[in-house]
Image: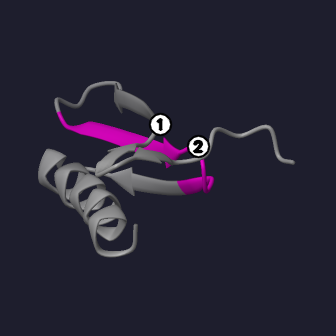
Amino acid sequence: MSGRPRARSAGRRFERVFVLRVWSEAGSAAIRGSVVELASDRRFFFTKLADLRDFLSLRLEADLRDP
């Protein structure tokens, strides 16, 4: 067992645990970030909040399709 939390479902409720890191480079107003889904250890890097939203939406929609 990996010790990582697994996605849990109870009926039609799904839970995922993500670790989100956000930072900015010195001298720049632009943000950068990464998100890790702990159950699968998938890591995604982003420079736009819209990309973060898309990543999270895809991961959560996958639960609804494949319970």
Mark 1–mark 2 Cα distance, whole angstroms, equals 6 Å
The residue where tag 2 is placed is 38
Which range of residues does the magenta coloring cover?
30-42
Q: Nearer the viewer, residue 55 or 8?
A: 8
* Residue at x 39%, y 74% (from the top left corner): 66
x and y, in percent, of residue 32 in the image = 32, 40
The residue tagged with tag 2: helix, strand or loop? loop
Q: Residue furthest bottom?
A: 65
Q: Position of residue 28 (x, y in %)?
A: 23, 31
Snapshot quadrant of residue 29? top left
Q: Secondary structure at mark 1?
A: loop
Residue at image point 47% right, 36% down: 17
Amino acid beneath label 2: Leu
In the rendered image, the residue lying farthest to the right is 1
Q: Nearer the viewer, residue 1 or 55?
A: 1
In terms of secondary structure, what is the magenta stretch mainly?
strand
Other residues around mark 2 within 10 Å, as few (<14) / some (14–19) / many (≥20): some
Q: Nearer the viewer, residue 57 or 6?
A: 6
Check disc 1 and report the residue beneath it.
Answer: 17
Amino acid type, mark 1: Val
Q: Earlier in the sequence, mark 1 or mark 2?
A: 1
Q: Residue 63, position in %: x, y?
A: 36, 63
Q: Residue at x 12, y 53 (%)?
A: 50
Say whether marks 1 and 2 touch (CB < 8 Å).
yes
**Residue 39 percent location from the top left of the image:** 60, 49
Outermost residue to the front: 11
Q: Crowdedness of circle 1 by 10 Å Cα count: few (<14), some, many (20+)?
A: some
